[in-house]
Image: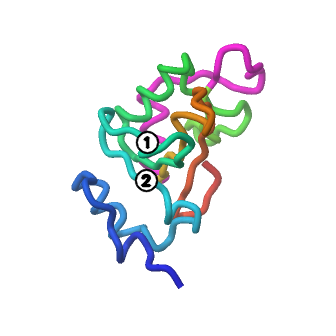
Amino acid sequence: MHKSLKDNLPKNISSEDKYYLSQYGDKLSDSTQYVQWISNPEDHEERLGKSLATRNHDVIRQWAEERKAVPATVSRTEHDNRPGTLRFNFPGYGGKNLKEISWDEWFKTFDERKLVFLFQEHLTNGNQSNFFRFDNPLREDA
């Protein structure tokens, strides 16, 4: 059995991430247990294709902006005038079921749900990757 992130905190992460992982690390998915954590926009993957995780708003925003993606929610998933399922709208990928929202709305929802942003910067062949998903220790849909 592997040690959870709560018991084996990554080195060189922010104090906010250390606190988050001490509270929720053992509730995150198995795949999140083995990713490289990124705490600021100057940090990057150790190798091409490496899965990364962050809760840092600047890292997430930079990743999206490099791909010309804008914050969005899936239409008709909103509840109580709050965004529903969080996504990004990438140019040229359809997005007809997505409703663009502000960064403030997106990050407020992200933080309230205590989400982790899992992503790749590059594919193993060196091409830019648009892969992302969320992990949630509370297990509600991101």
Classify residue 128 as left or right of residue 104.
right
- For this orientation, the residue located farthest to the left is 15
113 or 58, nearer to the observer: 58
The picture quadrant where one finds residue 92 is top right
Boundaries of the magenta span:
89-113
Residue 93 in magenta?
Answer: yes
Residue under numbered circle 2: 36
Residue 74 x, y percent position in the rendering: 69, 33
* Residue type for callout 2: Gln
> Residue at coordinates 60% horizontally, 29% vertically from top-left?
88
Q: Identify the disc placed on residue 45.
A: 1
7 or 45, nearer to the observer: 45
Q: Are marks 1 and 2 in contact (CB under 8 Å)?
A: yes
> Residue at coordinates 46% horizontally, 73% vertically from top-left?
26
Residue 23 x, y percent position in the rendering: 36, 69
Residue 108 in magenta?
Answer: yes
